[in-house]
Amino acid sequence: MSQADPSSQTYAQTPLGDWHRSAGAKMVPFAGYEMPIQYESIVSEHRACRSAAALFDVSHMGRLRFDGDGSEDLLDRLLTRRVTDLPIGGVRYGMVCNDEGGILDDVLVSHLKTPSETRYHLLVVNASNRAKIVEWIKPHLDDFPKVTFSDRTELTAMIAVQGPLAMETCKKLFSFDPSRLKYYQARITDQFSKPAIVSRTGYTGEDGFELVVRAEEATRIWENILLAGRDAGFAPAGLGARDTLRMEAAMPLYGHELDETVDPISAGLSFACNLDDRKFIGRDAIAAVKSAGPRRVRIGLLPAGRRPAREGCDVLSTAGQVVGTITSGGPSPTLGHPIAMAMVDAEHAAASDFEIDIRGKRAPATRTKLPFYRRAKK
């Protein structure tokens, strides 16, 4: 059977798709959407985020809403992170796991209250896993008849504004000053009388915020933020810079560091697993790994020289034994040299020196603490 021509496939568009194309973005297929990978260059967009702020269209990510009594109990059953004590305005990072403790997705859950005093929970999931997570949730709804579940992805847009100048420059654009939020807090506010959820979260290692707005308001709000930050050096950024930024911050990416064969403990995400005094899907399997110790662990590596190590490269001990695999790797625009994350056999993970097979040639590599980059504290 002949394979379909990728150019003939139809991809979903985000509410900002026309804006990206008019701005000259290079568009690529990603998780069923057509998304900008870069505008001018990945490096310039990366540096704009580190020095001023960058805007990312993350509307492809899934936004799932849970209304009604029992929402917190349902999510507490599904997530590795406790939800029943999440206060209004709180945001937590966690994972949805299968019975064996394998990660189905990593997610953010927020507890929000509308101006009319309606409380609900919002779950943000990865674009590539949205359909899978929706199907995973559906059977559990039968046990929570008062919960109303709705997929809000197509009705809304999501914009990330990330960088050291993001908060100060944008705080006057909203009826509520987002700089008053603490890290991992969220609030429903408005942008020129149109509702917006603003959360002090992100995926770059920088301060900043993420917005969920009505789809029809996305372009106006995107342009308002760019205009507000024009003199400060704000720039639109694509998926390319988003990837280099999250690698420097050692943030795991589903399909690279995380998948259904990886448990949260091995991935270095034990902080996002509340195992005591609660039951959730995968809890016992995760607790067993924590008790016995993981067989593989995630580590950071600094390859020698200028050649980057890419996903799938073998990691070897200095004796030449294959002990792991690179999960993410590439040049670091901030640090000026290659960086890589790897899953390595636990018995070898404490070693300081390794080798990486890069296209048939072995390159020395040194183990380093994660993250590779950490923003300066104010």
Image (cartoon, helix red, strand yellow):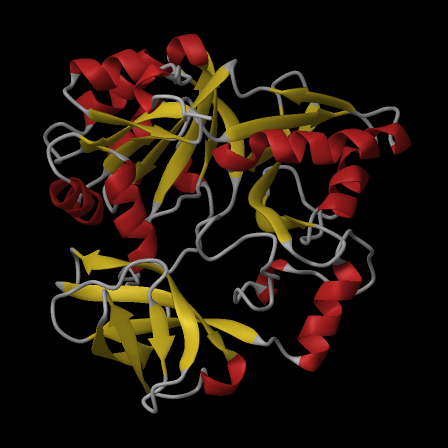
Image quarter for residue 27? top left
Residue 103 % position (x, y): 61, 52
Q: Which residue shows up at 51% across the image and 73% down it?
A: 297
Which is more toward the observer, 302 or 308?
308
| Left or right, 156 with reference to 247 | right
Which residue is the extreme one toward the front? 1
Whether residue 369 is visible here, answered yes or no, is no
Q: Which residue shows up at 76% across the image and 54% down it?
A: 99
Image quarter for residue 292? bottom right
Whether residue 179 is visible here, answered yes or no, is yes
Residue 307 % position (x, y): 15, 65
Locate the C terminus and report the quarter of the image it occupies: bottom left
Q: Which residue shows up at 33% across the image and 80% down it?
A: 367
Which residue is the extreme one toward the top? 216
Residue 156 vs 201, above or below: the answer is: above
Number of numbered callouts drawn: 0
Image quarter for residue 221? top left
Residue 346 % position (x, y): 52, 81
Residue 121 % position (x, y): 66, 32
Q: Which residue shows up at 24% across the image and 19% down it?
A: 20
Which is more toward the observer, 242 or 271?
242
Which is more toward the observer, 89 or 42?
42
